[in-house]
Amino acid sequence: MEGKINKQLKKVLKKIVKEAHEPLAVADAKLGGVIKEKLNLSCIHSPVVNELMRGIRSQMDGLIPGVEPREMSAMCLGLAHSLSRYRLKFSADKVDTMIVQAISLLDDLDKELNNYIMRCREWYGWHFPELGKIISDNLTYCKCLQKVGDRKNYASATLSELLPEEVEAEVKAAAEISMGTEVSEEDICNILHLCTQVIEISEYRTQLYEYLQNRMMAIAPNVTVMVGELVGARLIAHAGSLLNLAKHAASTVQILGAEKALFRALKSRRDTPKYGLIYHASLVGQTSPKHKGKISRMLAAKTVLAIRYDAFGEDSSSAMGVENRAKLEARLRTLEDRGIRKISGTGKALAKTEKYEHKSEVKTYDPSGDSTLPTYSKKRKIEQVDKEEEVTEKKAKKAKIKVKVEEEEEEEEVLVEEETSTKKKKKKDKKKHIKEEPLSEEEPCTSTAIPSPEKKKKKKKKKDSED
Amino acid sequence: MVPGLSVYGERRVTVTENGVKQEYRTWNPFRSKLAAAILGGVDQIHIKPKSKVLYLGAASGTTVSHVSDIIGPDGLVYAVEFSHRAGRDLVNVAKKRTNIIPVLEDARHPLKYRMLIGMVDVIFADVAQPDQSRIVALNAHTFLRNGGHFLISIKANCIDSTASAEAVFASEVRKLQQENLKPQEQLTLEPYERDHAVVVGVYRPLPKSSSK
């Protein structure tokens, strides 16, 4: 077809034409040349040949006897289809529907298997509850059950292939002193049926997983290398087909699978999720939580390239995937080591480290937090009068404050500026009496006209009480 | 020809004629150059039932399916398309219709698919390539019978985007004449396409017999 001589053609040529000793008319110049080389037959290629060909073609039906037109057309059709298929390299291997179906089936199987196992445990637990606690692995449990069945048979049965010796001994001991009920033959029969089903399904599940791995390697080898079979298969299944997946942007692939969180965050103007299905890829799994976001983004970018290569590329080698994965792993190592070299930008520039400056912070003691009483400035205002009255009302209830006040007053005598009349009013102690008098002299200076008569009155009262 | 199936999402109409239910598919002139030509008023498309058609530039098989409907089960249309993506769709269409033979080869090298095609009555070319005329000529020399016809859809932009459309059409017609492809009609595809023309002609016309 493409200028090469087929074996059959060679045979025919050798047989027939060599005997005829006549030049061979060839339509394809290249083919003619090749025939001449290999078989030493003289070939003619000229417009005359073309005319001859036309004539032959027109009369083809008549020239070849014994071939019905229908057969001819059928042959043509079949030949055309097979050639087209060959052209398209149409192989059943490349169909990605298999992947989508397989992964869905895998998930379904897991769910069903879990249900069945739970049911099995519960059901058999009526008869022999201790076994459930001793054997935690589901498959071993079922196999054990299948072998033995009724509790009485445990003593005689050998479970050495399934269980290690101590566990086996434990099981046998527990069988003797079990507190489960007795069950009839029929019941055990049914439980055994369920067990066989469970075992079959688990075996099928492992088979299916292998099948999925094979398909993934055949259909999308680069994706498999980058993110692994399961994650790759889930991505394809999520998008619907490999071609659909290839149309997505890298950022979409990054959060594929986290749509609910994405749109919720977008609506409420919060941070969007950093990873979707890609989170389960091994590269993302092995990084520390700090760098998972970064790695997820980088992985998504390279994975998208791998996806497109697999979807649209002609050859199906995984060289590109391997290369990219190596790149990513190198970057990951740099990230993990907190490398001093920047990843983006010019790789040669060293990351800037800030100069260490000793910032000395000297804190001084702030006395404003000492007193719970409100402090007043030297210059008193009219509004402060009300406050003073309120304070005097409270004085009776709070004895501790009085004590404090006394202490403060002792201090404040040194700091004369901050004296307030309210504190003076609270004084009931006779000891302070003497102090009052010199302080009271200060009062008329500091106090306003209105409150002064009140204070004087109170003072008089005190003086009266003291007297 | 295959009732109940829509090839490219076109609408289908079922009509009862003389007690027999016939399904018709709507043919979109905006998508199909052949339909545009027919609606534009071309005299003869030469595609009749039982004719053999060589269709160059079949793409996804949308117009090819209509041609297949016209020629019926006794005719044959050889659909040549080089692109793999479109070729896949073409093969799918060909699966359903047995009078379509898909050929996924470059139309520039008719020798590559010479074993698949017998002599044809009509060549329809919609390839949109600058060397269109040469392609058609090569295929005509190899496959088109004497007195056979050809329909070529010329896109002026494709041949030469700087020259005016009329000039491009004229030059193409001249090239065809040199190859013994005698043009008989030419019409533009307004209002369906811009700067497009369809040239209908005959190849190696049979000598006219004196009688009749």
Image (cartoon, coloured by chain):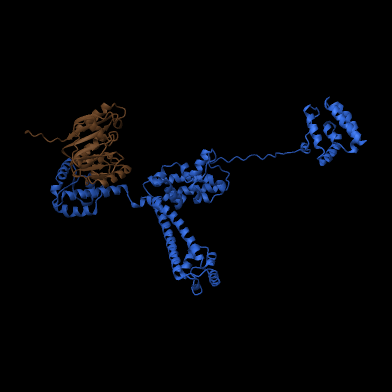
Residue B180 makes an appearance in the image? no
Picture quadrant of residue A358:
top right
Q: Is residue A281 left or right of residue B22?
A: right
Residue A49 vs residue B134, the one in the foreground? B134
Chain A hue? blue
Which quadrant is the C terminus of chain A positioned in? top right
Per the rendering, the colour in which chain B appears is brown
Q: Quadrant of residue A204?
A: bottom left
Q: Residue furthest bottom?
A: A156
Task: Residue B133 in the image: state x and y as whole percent.
Answer: 24, 34
In this rendering, the answer to whether A112 lies above or below B51 is below
Q: Which percent across, then down, holds residue A296?
A: 51, 46
**Residue A403: in sight, yes or no?**
yes
> Furthest residue to the right?
A467
Total numbered badges shown on the rendered structure? 0
Q: Residue at horizontal 48%, vertical 61%?
A: A119
